[in-house]
Amino acid sequence: MKIEKDKIEEKVIQKLKTIKDIELPISIYDLGLIYNTNVEVVNDNVNVDIETTVINSRCNSTKSFEIEIENQVKSIYEVDACSIKFVYTPKWDVSMISEKGLEQLRSVN
C-alpha cells in the first residue's frame, strides 16, 4: 500500500480545524496555535508530530488540548501514532490568526 503523506497531512489539518479554543469560538488551527505538522512513514507506520503553543504561557489547559489533539489525529485511519510538543518560541500573537479566524472573531462581536 502506497501511503500518501500529503493526503494524510491534509486530513490532519482538517481534524485540527475541528478543535475549538477553550475561550474563543475559533479552531486552534485558525488561531495559529499549530506551528508545525509533520507526517513520517516508518516501516509502513504513519507517525504524526505536531508542534503547538498556547495563547498564554500560564495557561493550564495544555493537557486537555494534548489529549484532544491526539484523539482527533489518531482517529484518522492511516495514523498509527501522534506526538504533541508544546513550544513557546516564537511567542503567539494575533498576527498568527488566519483570515478565516479573523472573520470568525469579527462575527462574534
Image (cartoon, helix red, strand yellow):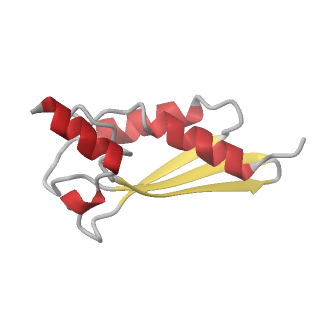
- Residue at 13% across / 54% down in the picture? 58
- Point out residue 6 in the picture as x, y percentages from the top left corner: 69, 51
Q: Residue at x 9, y 33 (%)?
A: 109
Give the quarter of the figure containing the N terminus: top right
Above or below residue 69? Residue 34 is: below
Residue toward you, 77 or 64: 77
Location of residue 107 (image quadrant): top left
Relative height, residue 61 to residue 35 (above, below): above
Out of 58 and 35, give the one closest to the viewer.
35
Name of the residue lying farthest toward the right? 1
- Indicate whether 3 appears above or below 37: above
Name the outermost residue toward the left: 109
Q: Between residues 86 and 103, which one lies in front from this camera angle?
A: 103
Q: Is residue 78 left or right of residue 44?
A: left
Q: Is residue 100 left or right of residue 80?
A: left
Give the quarter of the image for residue 18.
top left
Q: Nearer the viewer, residue 91 or 101?
A: 101
Q: Is residue 2 visible?
A: yes
Instruction: Identify the residue at image location x=58%, y=28%.
Output: 75
User: On the picture, is 84 further left or further right than 7?
Assistant: left
Q: Position of residue 38 (x, y in %)?
A: 58, 57
Question: Residue most toward the bottom?
Answer: 90
Residue 108 position in % (x across, y down) = 15, 31
Judge from the rendering whether residue 44 lies leftward or rightward of residue 27; answer left or right.
right
Q: Taking the image as drawn, is residue 23 in sight?
A: no
Where, by quadrant of the figure, is residue 101 drawn?
top left
Numbered-mark total: 0
Q: Name the residue rendered at 29%, 71% in the picture.
A: 90
